[in-house]
Amino acid sequence: MERSFYKKYFQLEKDNWWFRVRRNLIVDLLAKYNISKTAPIFDLGCGSGYTIGYLQKLGYNVSGTDISAEAIEFGRSQGVDNIEVAQTGHIRPPEKGFDVILALDVIEHIQDDVGAIKAIELALKPGGIAIITVPAYQWLWGVQDDVAHHYRRYTLNSFSHVFHRNTKLAVAKKTYFDTFLFPPIAIVRLISKWFNINDRESDFDINNPLLNKVFFWIFDLERSLLRCFRFPFGVSILLVLRKND
């Protein structure tokens, strides 16, 4: 991610419709898979740790790392506990492994995505789950991917090839999401690409208080449906992978 975008991104995490609904989605999944408040949860690539702080306030036992010392320093200044700068490409789990590992829009930042999934597998306890989100469709590549230094976007099939090389991980849930807002997001990205429109620092610039409320309502409605349904397309992909005993 561009260093100039860090501080703005930190501020967005609190109020932006996308991050708010994604946090609600994570809480839904922790409840669905009966994750105890005392179970160790690890957030890989946690950024400033806003999600960690949010879950800690709900009583969850969460820690995390990020490669950015600036991000970790900012998170600590905001009162987030148990976050540190990642020193290696490995995850240091507790003796029995983590019950949950979160990788929320992280894998696309890592050149060796197969190695990243393998590290997640090794750090999970038997029966533990990984909750992973990644951006969908390479043809949706836009300014947000550039500023965030993404290596790629995925389809469900292409991401399946990544984790199927790790035979101890089985799919518990897989779906596209951010489906209801897919048409306007796709139109904006395609028009920007076709007409070479680069007048914004990121896609988060396309927002105001009214849009933020409307987008939140639409996306949060979709979240409630994700409890029971899978969506065939969307701006992002969600996978829950379980480590076999």
Image: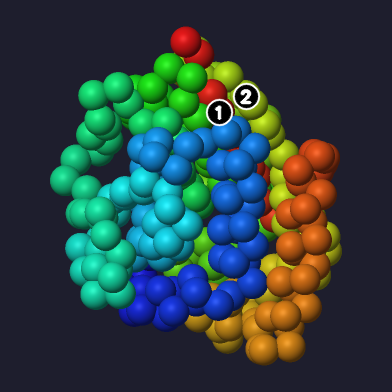
Residue 58, percent across and down?
47, 57
Q: Which residue has dot 2 on it? A: 171
Q: Is residue 144 above or below residue 129?
A: below
Question: CB under 8 Å between callouts 1 and 2?
Answer: yes
Amino acid identity at mark 2: Val
Residue type (three-letter) at the residue carrying disc 1: Leu
Residue 186 visible from this viewpoint: no
Q: Could you tell me which residue is drawn at 49 percent across and 50 percent down?
A: 104
* Residue in view at x 62 percent, y 24 percent: 171
Task: Specify few, some or many for label 1: CA neighbours under 10 Å numbering under 14, 14-19, or 20 or more.
Answer: many
Picture quadrant where residue 141 is located: bottom right
Dot 2: within a 10 Å radius of its alpha carbon, few (fewer than 14), some, or many (20 or more) residues? some
Q: Secondary structure at mark 1?
A: strand
Q: Position of residue 109 (x, y in %)?
A: 42, 50
Location of residue 75 by image quarter = bottom left
Q: Farthest residue to the left: give it.
A: 87
Whichever of labels 1 and 2 marks the residue nearer the N terminus, that label is 2
Q: Residue at x 68, y 34 (%)?
A: 174
Which quadrant would the N terminus be assigned to in this image? Answer: bottom left
Where residue 44 appears, as percent x and y from the top left, is 37, 46
Measure the alpha-carbon separation of dots 1 and 2.
Answer: 5 Å
Q: Which is more toward the observer, 186 or 99?
A: 99
In the rendered image, the vertical position of residue 204 relative to residue 161, given as above or below: below
Relative to 202, is 180 on the left or the right?
Answer: right
The residue where tag 1 is placed is 241
Camera-nearest residue between 212 and 68 = 212
Number of numbered markers? 2
Quick check: 177 left or right of 104?
A: right
Can you say whether 165 is above or below 46 in the image? above
Q: Left or right: where does residue 192 sit relative to residue 93?
A: right
